[in-house]
């Protein structure tokens, strides 16, 4: 650890010593948890599908005696709700049928008896919610893999889709990154229809109380299903009939599977996973196993060894949780931003240098999937995870620029090539701007809504259209680099942001919960780019934040707000969401808001314990569950039926980033010191 440089008494922020003390404690907490090579990383918590699917996946791979299986089972039992179900996010109003069925199947595969009280409660809950007929496509695939569901009653994904040209609507490159990476191994599963049935005494007969022969395995028809839905269902039935009839020709099918296998092998990450997320990693291993790749094959061995990497697994006593992803790049750049905002860079110069060097080394300078549609664009983005060079993302790249910008003119960093890194990233971001002026997460113009009608796409999101929060981060990054609001890309981006403001004043949060996140991202970006902060749109956004401050001074919003609009801006107060709201209000700098800002800061200071904050709530968003990847009108009275989800978010995927509770409050307190200490 470096020698700490004491802050000068002449520093204007010394007029708010209670903030200074909280900031110093938070900075020390961060420094104590910095990894030896300079980076930070927190756990990424999701839901029990991770443990359940790995438990079942190891069974399908013939690794039923793998030492992780009982540990995964122990984790499942620890996260079961009292009513017998498993939930998608902390504090959800109800359990989730899909997660509960997968957890139940995983525990049965481990030999836990149907008479066990925990299994009885889970089974009764499943049947009370309509039983197996209500589960999603992915759960049906898992049941098919273990012999509990007929493959011909699952949506068919033919491997020949790999040959579709990019101009064709159903090209794999028109699906979102996460959907594409998951689809590819699933095409092999759909073509080969592998089954490794559970032993007779562990089968799930008890979930078919009326018997299997009378059970309706068809996907339920959703209310309001239109022509596209009927057409794709008919196509799916035709594909199954062709497969039963031995079509397509054997050589053609073998060639398609060969090309898909090559695609999978070429897309394996350096750490052994795929796509930086759990589904393509696990499905990729199963697909290669089906294609007779042994456990000792290099790709298989690396993929299985990845299970032991601390970036993916969390061990607590006799239980193991497998993370849906890992966030070291994101966590490190946001911690650097927090240090800059809080005036801690000069207090911890060596630690900051280590983090900056680590970040610069993580820039992705090779083409990825994005380059299929943009072959002439020079790479230059950052990915979210330890290893995911095929899929750098716009949000990480924008935040990297915000973190690096304050250091760009320092001699030592110019010698390390910081200016070239910033130039490559800026050029890449410009090329990735969507036609409507916004930015998406991974791709450009990835918004063909017809794809969401395919039966396969009944999960979270199949598309990656532009979002306001990512666009705001790009605007802020360009502003930090001195780019004017008159720049053509910025003019289009600002128009996109204003066009997507909600009537009540806030902005929707695509990648964080929810309107507090979106609004907390937009206001600092508008201030940074030089917008007139007295604009009516900005005033309405600030008023909305003020109206949703709670009596304890904090802010909070439930994940349920993605389905219940009356919950926008409402929920348990949290450190991260309070920080987002504060940063929005601080950016607007309305003197009338200073008392609210001070109350928010005092809430954070009062809630701080041992230098950090406790936050079990999920404030990160993977998928809202709408299918189209962007905000939708929530006033349709049949929306819950059409989406097959309510406020429990059965189609959604919510996340708890462990360090959100820490670096965002540090950021907000640092900015508040400058504002209140003036």
Image: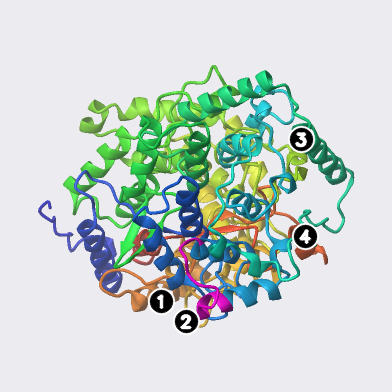
Evaluate if marks 2 and 1 touch, with contact meaning CB atoms under 8 Å apart: yes
Judging by the rendered image, the residue that carries numbered circle 1 is: 603
In the image, which disc is placed on residue 346?
none
Per the rendered image, the range of residues in magenta is 109-120
Q: In front of the other: label 2 or label 3?
A: 3
Q: Which residue is mark 3?
A: 244
Label 2 secondary element: loop
Q: Is residue 111 magenta?
A: yes
Q: Is residue 102 visible?
A: yes
- Is residue 6 or residue 54 the one in the foreground? 54
- Looking at the image, is mark 1 or mark 3 nearer the viewer? 3
Q: CA distance from mark 1 to mark 3?
A: 64 Å
Q: Of callouts 2 and 3, which one flags the residue occurring earlier in the amino acid sequence?
A: 3
Q: Label 4, on which residue?
A: 213
Q: Are marks 4 and 3 in contact (CB under 8 Å)?
A: no
Mark linked to residue 552:
2
Sequence order check: which comes first, mark 2 or mark 1? Answer: 2
Q: Please determine whether, in this image, residue 441 is positioned above or below residue 335.
A: above
Q: CA distance from mark 4 to mark 3?
A: 20 Å
Q: Nearer the viewer, residue 48 or 292?
A: 292
Q: Going from the N terminus, do you reach mark 4 or mark 1 first?
A: 4
Q: Secondary structure at mark 4?
A: loop
Residue at image position (36%, 30%) is: 298
Residue 317 point in image, percent of width and height? 29, 68
């Amino acid at each position: 650890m470096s020698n700490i440089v004491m802050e000068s008494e002449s520093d204007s922020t010394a007029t708010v010593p209670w903030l200074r003390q909280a900031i110093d404690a938070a900075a020390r907490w961060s420094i104590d948890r910095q990894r030896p090579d300079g980076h930070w990383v927190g756990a990424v918590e999701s839901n029990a599908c991770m443990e359940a699917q790995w438990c079942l996946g190891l069974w399908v791979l013939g690794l039923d005696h793998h030492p992780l299986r009982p540990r995964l089972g122990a984790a499942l039992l620890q996260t079961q709700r009292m009513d017998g179900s498993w939930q998608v996010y902390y504090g959800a109003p109800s359990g989730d049928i899909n997660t509960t069925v997968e957890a139940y199947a995983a525990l049965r595969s481990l030999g836990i008896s149907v008479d066990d009280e925990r299994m009885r409660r889970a089974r009764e809950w499943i049947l009370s919610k309509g039983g197996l007929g209500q589960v999603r496509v992915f759960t049906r695939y898992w049941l098919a893999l273990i012999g509990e569901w007929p493959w011909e009653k699952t949506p068919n994904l033919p491997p020949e889709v790999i040959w579709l040209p990019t101009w064709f609507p159903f090209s794999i490159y028109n699906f979102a990154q996460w959907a594409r990476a998951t689809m590819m191994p699933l095409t092999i599963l759909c073509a080969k229809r592998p089954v490794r049935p559970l032993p007779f005494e562990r089968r799930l007969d008890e979930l078919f109380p009326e018997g299997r022969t009378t059970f309706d395995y068809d996907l339920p028809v959703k209310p309001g299903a239109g022509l596209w839905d009927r057409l794709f269902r008919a196509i799916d039935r035709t594909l199954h009939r062709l497969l039963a009839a031995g079509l397509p020709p054997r050589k053609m099918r073998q060639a398609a599977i060969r090309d898909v296998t090559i695609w999978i092998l070429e897309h394996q990450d350096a750490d052994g996973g795929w796509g930086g997320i759990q589904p393509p990693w696990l499905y990729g291993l199963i697909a290669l196993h089906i294609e007779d790749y042994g456990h000792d094959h290099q790709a298989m061995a690396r993929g299985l060894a990845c299970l032991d990497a601390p970036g993916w697994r969390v061990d607590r006593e006799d239980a193991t949780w497998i993370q849906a992803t890992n966030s070291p790049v994101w966590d490190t750049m946001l911690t650097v931003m927090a240090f800059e905002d809080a005036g801690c860079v000069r207090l911890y110069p060596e630690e900051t240098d280590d983090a900056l060097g680590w970040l610069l080394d993580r820039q992705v300078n090779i083409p990825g999937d994005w380059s299929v549609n943009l072959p002439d664009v020079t790479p230059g983005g950052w990915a979210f995870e330890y290893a995911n060079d095929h899929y750098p993302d716009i949000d990480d790249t924008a935040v990297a620029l915000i973190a690096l910008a304050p250091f760009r003119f320092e001699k030592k960093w110019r010698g390390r090539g910081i200016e070239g890194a910033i130039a490559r990233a800026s050029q890449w971001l410009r090329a990735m701007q969507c036609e409507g002026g916004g930015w998406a997460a991974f791709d450009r113009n990835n918004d063909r809504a017809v794809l969401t009608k395919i039966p396969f796409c009944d999960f979270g999101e199949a598309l990656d259209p532009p979002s306001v929060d990512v666009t705001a981060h790009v605007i802020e990054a360009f502003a930090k680099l001195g780019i004017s609001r008159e720049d053509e890309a910025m003019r289009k981006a600002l128009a996109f942001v204003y066009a997507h403001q909600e009537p009540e004043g806030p902005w929707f949060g695509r990648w964080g919960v929810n309107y507090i996140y979106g609004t907390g991202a937009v206001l600092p970006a508008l201030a940074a780019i030089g917008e007139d902060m007295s604009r009516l749109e900005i005033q309405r956004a600030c008023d909305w934040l003020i109206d949703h401050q709670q009596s304890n001074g904090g802010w909070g919003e439930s994940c349920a707000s993605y389905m219940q609009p009356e919950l926008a801006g409402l929920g348990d107060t949290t450190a991260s969401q309070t920080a987002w709201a504060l940063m929005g209000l601080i950016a607007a700098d309305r003197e009338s808001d200073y008392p609210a800002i001070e109350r928010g800061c005092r809430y954070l200071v009062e809630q701080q314990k041992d230098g950090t904050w406790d936050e079990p709530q999920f404030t990160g968003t993977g998928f809202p569950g709408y299918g189209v990847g962007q905000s939708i009108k929530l006033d349709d009275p049949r929306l819950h039926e059409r989406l097959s989800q309510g406020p429990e978010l059965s189609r959604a995927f919510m996340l708890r980033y462990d360090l959100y509770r820490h670096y965002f409050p540090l950021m907000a307190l640092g900015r508040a010191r400058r504002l209140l200490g003036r």
